Image: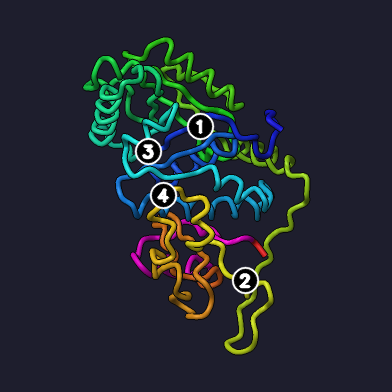
Amino acid sequence: MSSRGARVHERTDITVGVVGCGRMGCAIAGEFVRRGCTAVLYDHTEYTRNRAFQTLRASLWDHVANGYLLKQDVEELMGRISVCDTLADTLVKSQVVVESVFEDLTLKKDLFNSMGSIAMSQSAPHDQVLLCSNTMAIPMSDITEDMPKESRGSCIGMRFLHPVWFVDEVELTESDYTRRTTSQEAEKLLKQLFFQPFFFDGCYRRKLTLSEISTYQSRQRLRCPEPIKSVPKRGIRKKFGSPPSHEKEPPVVTEESMSSVELVESASSPDRATAEESEPCAVCLEEPRWALLIPCGHMAMCIDCAEKVLHGTRPICVVCRQPIEKILRAAPPP
C-alpha cells in the first residue's frame, strides 16, 4: 500500500529525528511516521519528551474522530515513534534531523552549532545526516554561519506548511553554504515519501489557504475505507447513577499502554505515572482526565469539563492559567 494515495504508508528504513517537541514538532513527526518513517524525538527536558507522546496520541485520536484515520492506525503509528535522551543519540539514529524549536536566532544557532560539533566528532561522513530547519522567518545562512565548514554544507531549510498533517507540499530553502548534493538528497528523500518539495524563490513564502487545507483533509478522509461516525456530544452526567457503558473503559493514555511504544526504559515503569494522569478530573472529581489542553499540554480535566471551560467566560487551564486554544481527546472516540 506504499502509494501516494495510502492512508498510512508501509514502514520504510528511513529514520527521522525531530528536535523540539512542541505542537509543530509533534505534527512533523506524526506526518513522517504516517508516510512510513520511524521517528525519534528529542527535547531538552524529560517532561517535554514524554509529553510529546501524549500530544501525538491525542492528535491521532482526534484524526480518527474526524475520519482521517482508522482506530487501528493509532497503535501502528505510535509504534514507530521513540524518544532520545541526548542530541547526540538523535543524530546517530537518524538519516535526517528536522529542527522545530522557537523562532529565535540565538537558540537555533546554538542548536545547529551543537549538531555540527557532534557531526564533526563522529567517524561517519559529515554529509551522511541532513540537518534541516523548519524556520520560516530566519535565513538559513544566519543560522549556520558559525558552524564548522565540514558540517554546514549538510544544512538546509525544510519548512512544513501548517497544519502539516496530510499536506504534501514542503518548502526547501538553501543557504549560502548548502551543498548541491544536500539539496538533491533532501528533494529525493521527500519525493520518496510522496511529499511535493519545492524551493523557496527568495520572495514569496507559501501558505495554505483554508480551501487548500480542506482539500487535503478531504482527500485523506476518502482514503479511509470505513465510514467514521462522528463523535456524539455527551450530555451532562447526573451526579448520581451509573455512567454509560463506554465511559467505564479506562483511558488509553496510561503508562502500561505507552510502554510498548516508548523505547526509553525509564518511561516504561508504572511507578513513573504522573498524578496528573492517574487522578480524576480536577473539576468534577469523577471522570478520567482525557482532555489534553493546547497549547500548555496539561491533562487535568475530563472532556465535558474541558469543553465547559473552553466555551465559558474564562477559557484558561486550571493548572497553569494559560489560555486554552484547543482540546484534544487523549482516548479513542466512543
Residue at left offset 58%, top offset 24%: 196
Question: Nearer the N terminus, badge 4 or badge 1?
Answer: 1
Residue at left offset 49%, top offset 80%: 284
Q: CA distance from mark 1 to mark 3?
A: 23 Å
Q: Which residue is mark 3?
A: 19
**Dot 2 lies on which element?**
loop
**Dot 1 lies on which element?**
loop
Question: Nearer the N terminus, badge 1 or badge 3?
Answer: 3
Q: Between residue 66 and residue 249, name the one nearer to us.
A: 249
- Image coordinates of residue 90 in percent, x first then y, are 37, 36
Question: Nearer the N terminus, badge 4 or badge 3?
Answer: 3
Name the amino acid, label 2: Glu
Q: Is residue 176 magenta?
A: no
> Would residue 43 be visible to someone looking at this image?
yes
Secondary structure, magenta segment, majority class: loop
State the quadrant of the C terminus.
Answer: bottom right
Q: Which mark is residue 249?
A: 2
- In magenta, the rendered stretch is 306-332
- Image coordinates of residue 206 in percent, x first then y, are 50, 27
Q: Which residue is mark 1?
A: 207
**Dot 3 lies on which element?**
strand
Residue at left offset 46%, top offset 33%: 16
Q: Residues within 10 Å of mark 1 (few under 14, many from 20)?
A: few
State the quadrant of the N terminus.
Answer: top right
Q: CA distance from mark 1 to mark 2?
A: 41 Å
Residue 218 vertical placement versus 237 (above, below): above
Q: Which residue is mark 4?
A: 264
Q: CA distance from mark 4 to mark 1?
A: 36 Å
Horizontal side, residue 229 vs residue 92: left or right: right
Name the amino acid, label 1: Lys
